[in-house]
Image (cartoon, rainbow, N blue to C red):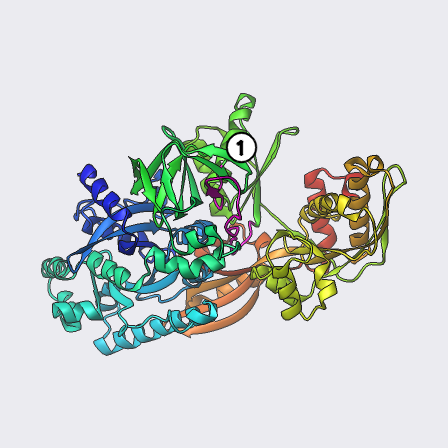
Amino acid sequence: MAEKMVEKVMRLAHKPDQIRNIAICAHIDHGKTTFSDNLLAGAGMMSEVDAGKACKLDFHEDEQERGITIDSASVSMVHVLNDKEYLINLIDTPGHVDFGGDVTRAMRAVDGAVVLICASEGAMPQTETVLRQALKERVRPILFINKVDRLIKELKLTPEQMQQRFIKQIADVNKIIRNVAPEEYKELWQVGIEKGTVGFGSAFHNWGISLPYMQKKGITFTEIINAYSGTDEEIKANVITLAKRAPIHEVVLDMSVLHHPNPVQAQKYRIPKLWQGDLESADGKTLMNCDPNGRLFFVITKVVVDPQAGEIAAGRLFGGTMKKGEEVWLNMSKSAGRIQQVYIYNGAKKEIVDNVPAGNIIGVGGLRAGMPGETVTSGGKTEPFEKISHLFDPVVTKAIEAKRPSDLPKLIEVLRQVQKEDPTIVVEINEETGEHLLHGMGELHLEVIENRIVKEKGVEVKTSPPIVVYREAITKESPQIEGKSPNKHNKLYFRVEPLDDEIVKGIKADKMGHGRFKKKDEHVMSFLRDECDWDTKTAQSVRAECNGNIFMDNTRGIVHINEIMELLLDMFEDVMKAGPLAKEPCVNVKVRLMDCTLHEDAIHRGPAQMYPAIREGIRGAMMEAGPLLYEPLQVTRIEVPTEYVGEISKLVSSKRGQLLEMNQEGDMTVIVAKLPVGELFGWSNALRSGTAGRGNSSLVDQSFEMLPRELQDKVRSQIVERKGLTAGNLGA
């Protein structure tokens, strides 16, 4: 069976117009994995009896225990529409906000998204987040409203009430698309029942419908409602009949084939956004045309460490043909590699093949240096794809150490693997002190990683209680501060000031780019000139961006400035990653080099002389600019029965939170509150006990705001004490 499937997949892999690369994405518990199961069953890859219960794409033990998807999973299958076969490369993504990084990375690999929403809950905060992630990567959405059976059985709505509910839900989704989509797609990508881009159904009961499908098969909505009336036995029989007449996989994959683009169509509008190279060059044409005969371009979106096969890098092949044994270049890690195996996906199973052309989602073995976001090419280095940027930052940290000292080397290796498998986890390894830090999106994220280190990687570990990552910022412009090299021959003069709001927003929206810039970088200059009203000369002086801070070279006529520029940017990045107050990352700081006097002889202005001078100058300027700590805050949506609103108000104020809005929907009240992450440990238990287990909450947004002044000194001393810092090594 598997062999036959592989032959089919490989035959279609060479016909790009018959390929659809899609992702299933939704808010947590809206039914994605059950839905994916049904698509697999429809493609003959698992039994129909298991569909909706086996959760085939949740193949990690902890995913099955917790009943949630933690990792994205890929599968390739064949679908037939109007006697023509299509290859569907599908990725099932997580819904929990702590694992949102996996959704972002999956979106780089696909061209279309099936957005699921629950018929009784509608579009939720995480629905907006996954749509935002899809549209940022120019991935076209279609909508499927799941769990329609709940409206009929539990809420007992009339057809008119159901219709009103659907219209509102579709309008909500379209509003998100209109707010987030690129200008030219705001209207074009709106979903609608008449367009055939909205489907309805129940993944659990394996049926689905869309307007074109109802017309084609002669099914009415009344028949669907009637299927759920009668005794339990009658309902069971009716639902089985309904699933045979309107199988969910047929409805959804028909929608995908008709409304999602094939790789050739998609790459024409996705490549200009994802790749900054020259579109008129040979490489540009290969990518725009998804040319299997051009240069190899493969973007890694996920790395999985397989006990038998070693590291397997999964991702999207945008150009060329991936062949076994080919020598390649990894552009981010600047290293060479060789492709040992090429795989196509089949749920948890991988099938080995000899070669696969552009336009497919595949796995490759042998790239040990590969990280998610890496651009792999043949024939040496080239312009890589844009870095994959995540919507939220890691804000919770745990220290982790091996229980047995003999396991320390293994733990270091495992932590490096963990960071490859999940780049939203930031791992800090200090091999000298043996202290290792894990920075993650939330308590659950770190708990899952910790469990996997113990259960799957076999290393016994101890961890500290979770702590919050703060940020350092400044409140005013500093005077000019001098940084002097140890040999007293070099002097540098710095000023720092807070960044303007529109630049902060622009950096967040990725309008300026990240990292170090070439002098007179056109991309940076056009953003600063056109959107921030900077004059050309000032815009030309921006040389780097790091974590939302920028460095400007305001010097004139300094002969050796270009020779020390890399050293300046090294130390700028160093201070921005560990500020002067408490060695926490800095945000919204503009650092300006005003002037410098440099020794004539290059030997007297090497790294040993320049690094201390630059670091001392930038830190000194920041300490004169009213430095403050910022704390992470989360905007949280809380749903509770109306009688518990008083309890929630008390709970929010006890956590230093503020209520932003409160709306009543039926017998439930939806509260939006802003809460400091530092007060959120144990939040879900407090919420459950305060609402008799009936309240739930989800993350809407994340931001950093000033820590109240009365807490500044207390929190700073706690961080300094925890990190074992002294005034000497703080540089203050």
Residue 431 forms part of the magenta stretch: no
Front residue of this view, candidates 164 and 614: 614
| Residue ID at (48%, 72%) | 662
Q: Position of residue 116 (x, y in %)?
A: 33, 61
- Up the image or down, 504 lies above or below 615; here it is below
Q: Is residue 192 left or right of residue 663?
A: left
Residue 381 forms part of the magenta stretch: yes
Front residue of this view, candidates 368 and 338: 338
Dividing the image into 4 quarters, which one contains the N terminus? top left
Front residue of this view, candidates 25 and 302: 302
- Up the image or down, 71 lies above or below 230; here it is above
- Residue farthest to the right? 488
| Residue ID at (35%, 38%) | 61
Question: Residue 134, can we see it?
Answer: no
Q: Position of residue 317 (x, y in %)?
A: 39, 47
| Residue ID at (21%, 41%) | 7
Q: Secondary structure at mark 1?
A: strand
Q: Quadrant of residue 664?
A: bottom left
Q: Amino acid at mark 1?
A: Lys
Q: Position of residue 297 (x, y in %)?
A: 44, 46
Front residue of this view, candidates 355 and 141: 355
Q: How many marks overall?
A: 1
Q: Residues within 10 Å of mark 1 (few under 14, many from 20)?
A: some
Residue under label 1? 462
Q: Quadrant of residue 497?
A: bottom right
Q: Quadrant of residue 475?
A: bottom right
Q: Position of residue 379 (x, y in %)?
A: 48, 39
Q: Which residues are magenta?
A: 370-394
Magenta stretch, overall SS: loop
- Residue farthest to the top? 406
- Up the image or down, 193 lies above or below 343; here it is below
